[in-house]
Amino acid sequence: MYVAVKGGEQAILNSHKLIAEERRGDPAVPELTLAQIQEQLQLAVDRVMTEGSLYDRDLAALAIKQAQGDLMEAIFLLRAYRTTLTRFGETLPIDTAQMAVRRRISATYKDLPGGQVLGPSYDYTHRLLDFALAAEAGAGAPEAERAECGVEAAIPRVTDILNHEGLIEQEVALDDDGPVGDLTREPLRFPAERDIRLQNLARGDEGFLLALGYSTQRGYGRNHPFAGEIRLGEVAVAFVPEELGFAIEIGEITVTECQMINQFTGSAERPPQFTRGYGLAFGHCERKTMAMALVDRALRARELDESVEYPAQDEEFVLYHSDNVEASGFVQHLKLPHYVDFQSELQLIRSLRRRHDENHKEAAE
Amino acid sequence: MGAANENAVVGDEGYNFAYLDEQTKRMIRRCLLKAVAVPGYQVPFGGREMPLPYGWGTGGMQVTASIIGRDDTLKVIDQGADDTTNAVNIRRFFARVAAVPTTEVTAEASIVQTRHRVPEDPLREGQIIVYQVPQPEPLRALEPREVECRKLHAYKEYGLMQVSLYEDIARFGEIATAYSYPVMVNERYLMSPTPIPKFDNPKLDDFPALQLFGAGREKRIYAVPPYTKVKSLDFDDHPFAIQQWEQDCALCGAEESFLDEVILDDRGGKLYVCSDSHFCARRRAEGHRGTLSEAAAKAYAAAVGADDTADAGEA
Amino acid sequence: MDNTAPLLRVRNLTHAFGHLLACADVSFELHSGEVLGVVGESGSGKTTLLNCLSARLTPTNGIVEYALRGRGLTDIYALSEPERRLLLRTDWGVVTQNPRDGLRMNVSAGGNVGERLMAVGARHYGAIRREAEDWLTKVELDLGRMDDKPKHFSGGMQQRLQIARTLVTKPRLVFMDEPTGGLDVSVQARLLDLLRGLVRELRLSAIIVTHDLAVARLLADRLMVMKDGRVVETGLTDQVLDDPHHPYTQLLVSSVLQV
């Protein structure tokens, strides 16, 4: 016999207990520590910090543990936590030209000042499963030897090099003293300026941006991109406390930065120049920053007088659907009871069918 | 209830009262004031992530969190019922972070947060009802571009909505919208009343209580102040009409409430019961009975886990 | 209202796209009941001119004045956007070259015609439908297709629907861009007949852009010939076509196959 079931308080509490049990898994297996997640699942932590809009490795690791490795769920946890934090000011913009570079490559030049620094990357590996990592003893403690001379400090950016000939457009802020938009405090409005667009993309889902970036390469808004520079490393974060009146360094963060260089044939007002796409993320997130830079450039179609024809160029389409916390919530909300609306639909369809049958009976007669 | 201690009304000391910080609450209240001043107009607000997902009531929760105080009593319903998972979850949230008393009795609540239904018991002056809104833009299905929608609202160009109703009549012989039925508020703004069944639309007109609407994901707030004109769109020769049932509530015999269809077996057996759980329980406590016999009613109640004799007491 | 005052007065209308001068220094007046044809080959600037005249493209220079009911000649670009949008929905009509641009393809034919009525407050379904039926009959569309969507109509039928949709609010001034372009010759002929009849019957004023001199001959009282963005010749239609003065006009006229 079928019976309509409604959830009660007790059922919800039981569900909590079940999930706690599942999360722990087999009690005979040692529990994951936050340190293990931070140290050995760094790239997961980096993604959660970037899309969670919060730079805190401990908290991101906790979120990943609590979410059983579901990164979107972890990002949601971090964002919800962020809501409770007080904001006491804004830092100065970070200066990636001063980055302590650990990896820096450019596809536009064979060699360049500062050199091609390969750094830590899967790009040069073969994707063969390494069963040594599965052994009881684990991977041990591999160590890379120190180089004879260190990486240069303050490596110049490729885009600055091109700048000297005036071949690449300048990245100029519309208004240096004006406030920078902030999507975590104000709603998205259109038309959206570049500061809001970049923030939206930085927080946006990596998979979504990857697909959109890919679509531009396949012809849905092609703009001939080149990876001008990708760099990974630590940058100082500086803050000006009101009481002091001058800047102090409050720490450093790891960021990945990508500058894409794109074609532009010029218009009535502007001579031909290279144009740019920009990507920035917390931690080591190359795929994200590259996709972000491709989409950033596509969204600049409007301001560069290019015709908007493809999804990656459509501001409303991209910016409204990039947030996976919003998307996940709304898609999954279909699991909530909708039986009142469904009841209305049932009634309506029954009434329409009655009308349909009557009309057909008339026609047949 | 067995889990009484777990559900005990205890404030969670780790968070500010009602979770949001005071600055955010102030920002939301400013938006609410603007919304009340322009009935039916969608005010953009800087919505925050809440501990429930987008689409699950974060907008309604942010509105409630911004207006609730220690003297308030909160009722939360989903699909008209106090005991659906979503309603339970949200009520527990506020019990945890605001330590306010909660209730299932409509008349005793100062704030009612609801998903997709208006309570059958009429609200009075001084009460506030907070609606959860999935899609605040009534024109969204007809015009996907936000910039164009804003112009249509600004210039009161609502012909497009009327055209869609015309199309329904041309195609089906009647207007085919059963919920989220569009309304004109204060003879100025076209508004979505949220996915309440059109059955509930007439209640919104000249309503004594304050009506607030929060959309968390879309980040919009709107409002209908008390005693405002709210008119469902229609044609002069195809006037707006609400749903009706041939049956009455099988439990309490109510003839005028919105009924849920309950499947009893896999041979098409069904019965109809009030969607508003408190309304039904109150009537039964007052002695009203429907066609379902006492024994069957007890069996039904046991099956759905509700206590038939509890007449809508405290949560 | 002063009957001698023009319905539309245009002075020094100019529009440039960057350095490209699309139309330059166009001036003319249109009186009530007149039909003005603007002819020229592709690239002559006639479509740009039409867009500037019909409030859909702000010109870089010049002024367009329309005699609004009760207000007299008013600069249309000095109006607010809602006033302009209302004008385009009521007193003015625009028939685009491609009917897909002027119709709602996902709305039924009846709905397309009824929309302008509903946009200005019509609320009786039966009355709206009857009026839509009237207009569909006037443009010789089969009433049996009234509830069908125009995406299933032929090009000629779509164009007739666009005309009905435009004329339902009884506009005083209609702008048409190549109204018979892209249609089969026989379909064109019937459509032109229909247009001519409607213009006379409703005493419409119209500005019609076309590269086809036969269309101009049939519909227009006066002609403006455009080349490279400038007006090179104007005058009564028959005079311009039978006795062209400007070499370019002579070239145009002589290029038309005499059948």
Image (spheres, coloured by chain):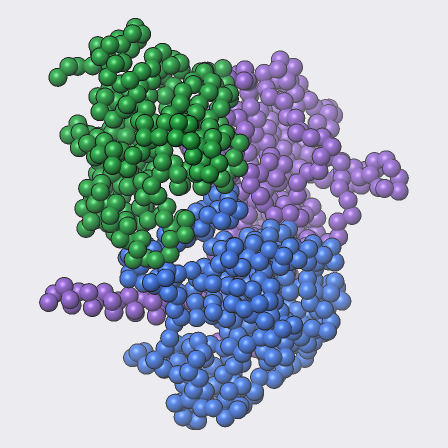
Chain colours: A purple, B blue, C green
Asked if one can make out residue A117 in the rendered structure from this viewpoint, the answer is no
Residue at x 46%, y 20% (from the top left corner)? C11
Q: Quadrant of the N terminus of chain A?
A: bottom left
Residue A89: image quadrant is top right
Residue A250: image quadrant is top right
Q: Is residue B212 left or right of residue C48?
A: right
| Count of marks placed on residues | 0
Q: Is residue A289 left or right of residue A240?
A: left
Asked if one can make out residue B178 in the rendered structure from this viewpoint, the answer is yes
Extreme right residue here?
A: A244
Q: Nearer the viewer, residue B8 or B43?
A: B43
Up/down of C3 relative to A25, above or below: above
Measuring from the top left, give residue C165's x and y in whole percent.
31, 42
Residue B171: image quadrant is bottom left
Q: Nearer the viewer, residue A27 or C9?
A: C9
Extreme left residue here?
A: A365
Measuring from the top left, give residue B220's x and y in whole percent.
58, 54
Residue at x 73%, y 25% (from the top left corner)? A154
Q: Quadrant of the C terminus of chain A?
A: bottom left
Up/down of C128 relative to B92, above or below: above
Q: Nearer the viewer, residue C138 or A295?
A: C138
Up/down of B58 relative to A263, above or below: below
Measuring from the top left, give residue A22's x and y in whole percent.
56, 65
Residue at x 68%, y 62% (from the top left corner)? B66
Measuring from the top left, give residue B63's x and y in whole percent.
63, 61
Q: Nearer the viewer, residue C178 or A159?
A: C178
Q: Is residue B295 left or right of residue A363?
A: right
Residue at x 54%, y 18% (from the top left corner)? A269
Extreme top residue here?
A: C247
